[in-house]
Amino acid sequence: MPGAPVSPQGSTGQGTTGARVLIVDDEPDLREPLADYLSGQGFAVLQAQSAADARSVLLQEKPDIVLLDIMMPGEDGLSLCRHLVETKSLPVILLTARGEATDRIIGLEIGADDYVTKPFEPRELVARIRSVLRRAARPAAAPEEDAWYEFEGWRLDPLKHQLTDPEGAIIAISSAEFRLLKAFLDHPRQVLDRDRLLDMVQGREAHLFDRAVDNQVSRLRRKIENGGEPRLIQTVWGGGYRFAADVQRFLPDSARNA
C-alpha cells in the first residue's frame, strides 16, 4: 500500500547485540539487504521508506538507533534528523550518497552522531552502530557525574539536558549545543582547539571541516551571550576557543537549594 510504513522486521537471536535499529531509506535495493545483514548480526530491525513512514513507526516502536538517508522524496533526512534529536533523543547515523560535505556537516551540527557515505562496507557500518550505541548508553553515574554546572547565573543540568538562564527561564538547546557547552564547562578557561572540540563533541576522530565547530559555537553564542563582542566563549586566533568564565558544580540537592 503506497505511503504505508514498511512492516518492521526483527531478528530473534543471531548474535548478542539485541539493539533495535530503524532504517529509513527510500531505496528498497539498499534498505532490505541491509536489514537482512543487520538481522544476521543480531540486531532487531525496523524499516521505513520515508520520513512520514518513520514517524508512523515511531508512534508504536522505540528503536535504539536510527540509520537515516538524507536524500528522500517528501520530508528529507535532515528535517527528520532534527526532529529525532530534539524530541526523541535518539542516536542517528546519516546515510548519504553525496560527495559534498555540506549535508554531512549540517547533519552533525543539528545533532547526528555519525555518518557513512554510500556505497559503504556493511561491517564498517556495524562497527559504527556499535560505537554510537556504546556512547549513547548511560551507565549508572556517580553522583558527582550528575552535578549541575553554574556559570554567570546560568545552570546546565546534565541529567535533563536542560539549560536555564539567570532569570530562571529554560532555554531550548539541541543535543549538539549541549555537548559543546558541556565540553566548555568541563574545561573552563582552557584553550580548546577545533580538533579537540570535534573529538569531544562528536565522540570520534571526525574528518570534518573547522566550519562544523565554528557554526556550533555561533549557535551556542546566540543562546548564552547578550550580543556584541563575545564574552563567555572567546575566540583564540590560531588556537580555537576558550570559555572565559568561572564554573561551579553542585550535586543535585545542593544545586536546588543554592
Image (cartoon, rainbow, N blue to C red):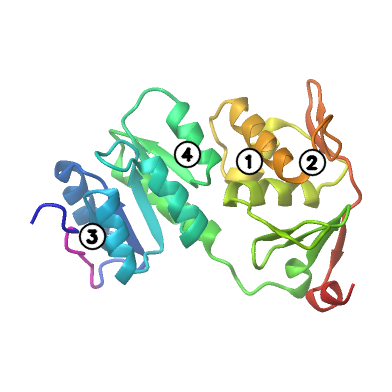
On the image, the x and y values in percent for residue 81 come to 42, 47
Q: Is residue 35 above or below residue 70?
A: below
Q: Which residue is mark 3?
A: 40
Q: Amino acid at mark 3?
A: Gly
Helix, strand or loop at mark 2? loop
Q: Which residue is mark 2?
A: 225
Whichever of labels 2 and 1 marks the residue nearer the N terminus, that label is 1
**Which is closer to the viewer, label 3 or label 4?**
4
Does residue 48 appear to the left or right of 207 in the view shown?
left
**Which is closer to the viewer, label 1 or label 3?**
1
Q: Is residue 11 magenta?
A: yes
Q: Amino acid at mark 2?
A: Glu
Q: Nearer the viewer, residue 252 or 173?
A: 173
Q: Amino acid at mark 1?
A: Asp
Whichever of labels 1 and 3 marks the residue nearer the N terminus, that label is 3
Q: Cα distance, mark 1 to mark 3? A: 31 Å
Q: Which residue is mark 1?
A: 199
Does residue 90 appear to the left or right of 27 in the view shown?
right
Q: Cα distance, mark 2 to mark 1? A: 24 Å
Does residue 149 appear to the left or right of 8 in the view shown?
right
Helix, strand or loop at mark 4? helix
The disc label shown at residue 107, or none = 4
Whichever of labels 3 and 4 marks the residue nearer the N terminus, that label is 3
Residue numbers of the magenta segment: 6-12
Does residue 188 appear to the left or right of 33 in the view shown?
right
